[in-house]
Amino acid sequence: MSVLPYVYRVTKYDPADRDEHGVYIGSAEPVGDQGPVESAYLQAVAAFAEAIGVDHLVVREPQIAAGLGFGVEPAVEGHGLAGLFPPDLTGFHDGAEVSLALGLELVRAMLRDSGTWCRLEVEGVFAVHVGWDQYVYIGGDRPCEDALARVAELGLFAERVEASPYAADHDEPGEQRPADDDFWARLHWLVIGFRAAILEETYVDHATRWHRLDGGSLDEVRARLRPRARLAVWPDLSADVGAVLAGLSEEGMIELVWEDEDGVITSAIADETRLPELTARVTGARAAAALSVYSDERRPLLTAVLPDADGVLRARWRTEPTASDRDWAVLKTLRPGQIVTGTVTEIAPFLVTFVDIGGFTAMINIPELSWRIVRNPSEVVGVGQEITAVILGVDMARESAWLSLKALLPDPMADLVRRVGEIVTGPVTKLLPFGALVRIEDAENGFEGLVPNGELAEEHVERPEDVVQVGDMLTVRIIKVDLTLRRITLSRKQTHAAAHPDGHPPS
């Protein structure tokens, strides 16, 4: 949201009753009267909205009452919403547009202790933020002198401030992962691999729905999610409910998640006072899990926030990034053909080499280490070595990236194309049912060519071992080099044939 140039702190507190530190020391109580003062606040908001020409407001970052207030006033019914929305909170979500009249009722609920809370805004034009102790911050794109005069008539005080302390914070590091097609492809891959089974949907702060996933239900679950919801993906619940309950401690808080006999998944926060009650409820469940309520201990597999229908992520709230989310942030910057620099972190003999590129571990398969034969990656690279490679491919579902070292190097086999027709001598390295392999370069990793059975001798050869053995030195002619298939074809019986003037062997 753009910064509004005119922001006013509207309160019932007389600025004259503040000490030298700006602390209010007057006699006005920091709780609402649910009467004329509360009504004055609503009229003040309406006056600013009228002055700016606003007839609707947009709900941002909503939360329902869940221990939000100080407990001085009675709790507000209906999740702190006083019946303004249905019990399932349909219509109360980030980005929901409400009439000015409904917006004013939301302000009323926010002015009451244990009421709901949200930001009410019109992008770049108008904003209302209700803070603690009856402080209301109203921002606009113009001065609104008539509204300021109306505030004074109502017996309230408006002070110009630089910004609302409740304005959304845009300075958080990192990038929020959207629940886009790449996210759902990754989730599908985890589900069919039995690594994930539960989706946590937080559609309003302190309001969560849980969904069990399988390969065929993802589209149906995706269609039922509330707009701009925050999502967290978890492994499956444990069928050993007794073990889950036995591991609980009476110290601190824990979130219990369980599936009842009807397949409904529920969660509740348990502390030492509620633990006995919740334990009794969960004992007969099909499956359960205990999750930490502390962000540094709460580790889902991956998280995301739903974008809008056009694919744009406009929700401002953030999820706590997981290792998968951090991998996503790197992977989405990678493209095939891109040149990257990284450090070799691990060598798996005869398999792959792992390379750290910007905090993400990519892989190099053995054939991509060199144009020549590599029997062990350590022949080419070492742990701790910095290398430059080309990205061959990126798979967002598997969160994998493959690199190539050889793509940045000239192909030495290209030199052999110019040597077609040349006669060379080399050792037999391997016998195959259809011919013999001969190394035609004087190096352990030199290129090898195939002498087909029909080219081993003038007479018909059924098996190469009838004519040659591994280790024998053979004199052969290079008759074909195929760079696409990486094949070199040799002939023993053509070693005495004259090369064609164009450099190719005679047909």
Image (spheres, rainbow, N blue to C red):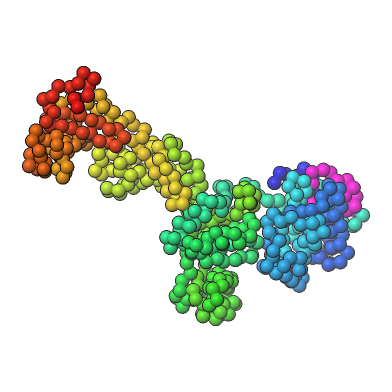
Residue 294, image quadrant: bottom right
Picture coordinates of residue 384 (x, y %)? 35, 42
Q: Is residue 351 left or right of residue 439?
A: right
Q: Residue furthest right?
A: 153
What residue is rendered at 11% in x and 25% in y?
A: 496
Q: Is residue 67 above or below residue 4?
A: below
The residue segment tinted magenta is 137-152
Return the residue nearer the eye: 296 or 214: 214
Residue 179 appearing in the image? yes
The answer to whether residue 460 is left or right of residue 413 is left
* Residue 342 on image: x %, y %: 40, 40
Q: Position of residue 191 (x, y in %)?
A: 46, 61
Nearer to us in this view, 157 or 484: 484
Residue at (48%, 61%) from the top-left corner?
215
**Quadrant of the image occupied by residue 271:** bottom right
Q: Is residue 15 visible?
A: no
Q: Is residue 178 above or below residue 456?
A: below
Spot occupied by residue 44 in the image (x, y as percentages of width and height): 85, 55
Residue 368 part of the magenta-drawn span: no
